[in-house]
Amino acid sequence: MPDRVTEPSDPRPLAAGVSAGASAGASAAPAVEFNDVQIAYGKFIAVHNFSLSIEKGSFVTLLGPSGCGKTTLLRAVAGLVGISSGQIAIGGRRIDDVPIYKRNIGLVFQNYALFPHKTVFDNVAFGLKYHNVPKADIAPRVARALEMVRLAGSERKLPSQLSGGQQQRIALARAIVFEPEVLLLDEPLSALDANMREEMRVEIKKIQKQTGITAIFVTHDQEEALSMSDRIVVMSAGKAEQIGSPTDVYDRPATTFVADFLGKANLLAATVKDRDAGGVSVTLSTGQTVRVATDRQVAAGDKVSVVVRPQKLAVGSELPNRLSGRVLSTSYLGSRIIYEIDLGQGSIIRANVAVVTEPVREGETIEVGFDPADCVLL
Amino acid sequence: MATRPADIRPTRGWRLYDPRLAWLLLAPATLLIVCFLILPILVMAVYTFFTFITAGVEQSTPTLANWHEFLTDPYYHGFLFKTLRVGVVTSLICGVVGYFPAYFIWSTEFKHKWLLLLLLIVPFWISFTIRTFSWIHILGEEGLINVALLRLGLIDQPLQMLYTEGAVIMGMVHFLLPYMILNVYVSLENIDRTLISAARSMGCTNAQAFREVTLPLSLPGLAAGLLLCFVLAAGSYVTPQILGSGRDALFGNLIYDTIMGQLNWPMGATLSIVLFLVLGSVAALYTRYMGMSQIVKGLGG
């Protein structure tokens, strides 16, 4: 346990040099900083030693399957769950023992959580009222927030008179109207239908950019994470598996979990054969040898995994790495075909290829190839 | 003309989900309600226009004498006002006293919440009459309180507690409190707890979040409880009979006395219809503004 200083509301800067994964060169204090945060429910540890520093104005997504601790972390920032050890700071000020109502945060919930007995105006004005905003300023600020979410004129309505998407936009207006330091979004799109989800995705991102607010977004949907975030924290079992930009985590997954969770990559077990200047040659468990462009330091005989995304495979191409196997299933999607291919030895891969020739039928042999630069060695 | 698919073609004149089937299924309940509730009330209504000759004898000659007597005799008005007052006081006490246990059961983190709810129902395992009689041993001249105070030398005359309006109200609060608690509890249970988190995140203290969110959203349950307690208290007969003993009788006892004591059936019917109309209009007013579904929820919970 770190030493506790007496006054809980005092600004207490964190010790320097703990900003794991922070982008270098940020001059001001990070908007949100987690330092070695651990959260336990009784004996169950929901979050293990989590450290992260979030730059002001950035959009960070906590991505992972349910039960990975992402929502718990968000709720810890909000003050809805206590942390067992470590510190959380907002704007350089430690807040982990500041009560929830004194933290300056905006929260958006999955189920909107609008007050059903209050009008849209009263819902949006709620935070202003409790942040001691002068009465005269409330109406214009509510109007501005509603304009921002394109629902101007709905002040007199009750939440039940609005659609799900509209309710979530009101919830967003309500969370940003009092200009909190951080906007926390807890799976805000999950309750919406698919069309609305895409629209809201764009809208949330636009509003976040416009207001320049720091946002922490929790989701289990990789598409949402990839399309909206400046940085993604991929989580599994209470730990951060990888922290990086969307292209980082998608193209250069750090662990097999990340590779599998984002886009269902093919994972091929392999043994290192030898390495030279251009990369590494590995022998797959099925006996085939492929080359991987990597600067990872490995020695011959090391057990590794080769990660290839289904879209990077091409049928019968002239690419250097070739795999052949029996087609288990063919899904024809018009412009593309998804093959499930059995390489033997229980190794099954998926290939998502452009339609250039007649589809290969189930049971027939197929040969697919990929470029050494289009795969990752783990 | 489109042809109808084979599978929804009528089978012997009946279709699946035929509206006639719904009526058939409703018939037994409808028949019961009509024969044993609506018709008897109508008979009573007709009785109010009968002529009273002497105890136990009446004629079907139509007359407005009963209604005239009720509307002009302040004796009846006094009973009606007293009954309404006792009903209002009882339900208000139930509301104030009942809200706290309901809130406690809702907010406790105790693992066996069902046990607390079960405790609310335990009193119903003992006959209502016995529970009412038990007050005599507490409030009576030789009752627990008087004996204790006498022995302690705090009083030298037993206090008159039994057979007062206070005793009647106490007995009814005792009987009605579980209904109130269950009603409030159910409406609290229906509150989405993320609403409270939302209020707290926007700067509310616990007390402010209660005032802004929990209290207003539990009002429908409180209102349902108030209506239920009011109607049951104002229509009660046994409690004032035992704990009021004639001196503090309510409208229900007046009706009993008119019919069974004076054998004046036309007047008894008139008084019954009056009580029915008064309580019915209170319930109708409630339904108009709050909706009856809340009470159904409360009873089901």
Image (cartoon, rainbow, N blue to C red):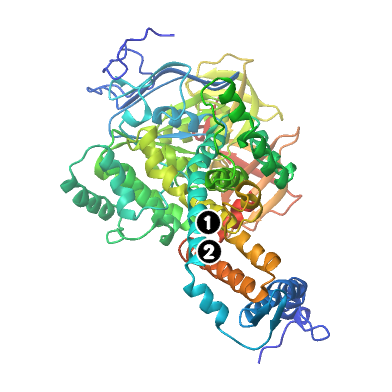
Could you tell me the amino acid type at mark 1? Answer: Leu
User: Residue at point 25% right, 23% down?
Assistant: A26
Could you tell me the amino acid type at mark 2? Answer: Ala
* Outermost residue toward the right in this view: B12
In the shown orientation, is residue A280 left or right of residue B118? left
The residue labelled by disc 2 is: B283
- Answer above or below: position of A139 versus A82: below
The residue labelled by disc 1 is: B227
Residue A373 lies, in percent from the top left, at 49, 33
The N terminus of chain A lies in quadrant: top left
Residue B286 lies, in percent from the top left, at 49, 62
Image quarter of residue A287: top right
User: Residue at point 60% right, 54% down?
Assistant: B297
* Outermost residue toward the bottom in this view: B1
- Answer above or below: position of A140 versus B36: above
The residue closer to the viewer here, A229 or A105, is A105
* Outermost residue toward the left in this view: A136
Chain containing the residue with disc 1: B
Image quarter of residue A268: top right
**Cβ atoms under marks 2 and 1 closer than 8 Å:** yes
Secondary structure beneath dot 1 equals helix
Q: Is residue A356 visible?
A: no
Cα separation, mark 2 vs mark 1, equals 7 Å
Q: Can you tell which mark lies on residue A154?
A: none
Image quarter of residue A16: top left
Chain containing the residue with disc 2: B
Q: Residues within 10 Å of mark 1 (few under 14, many from 20)?
A: many
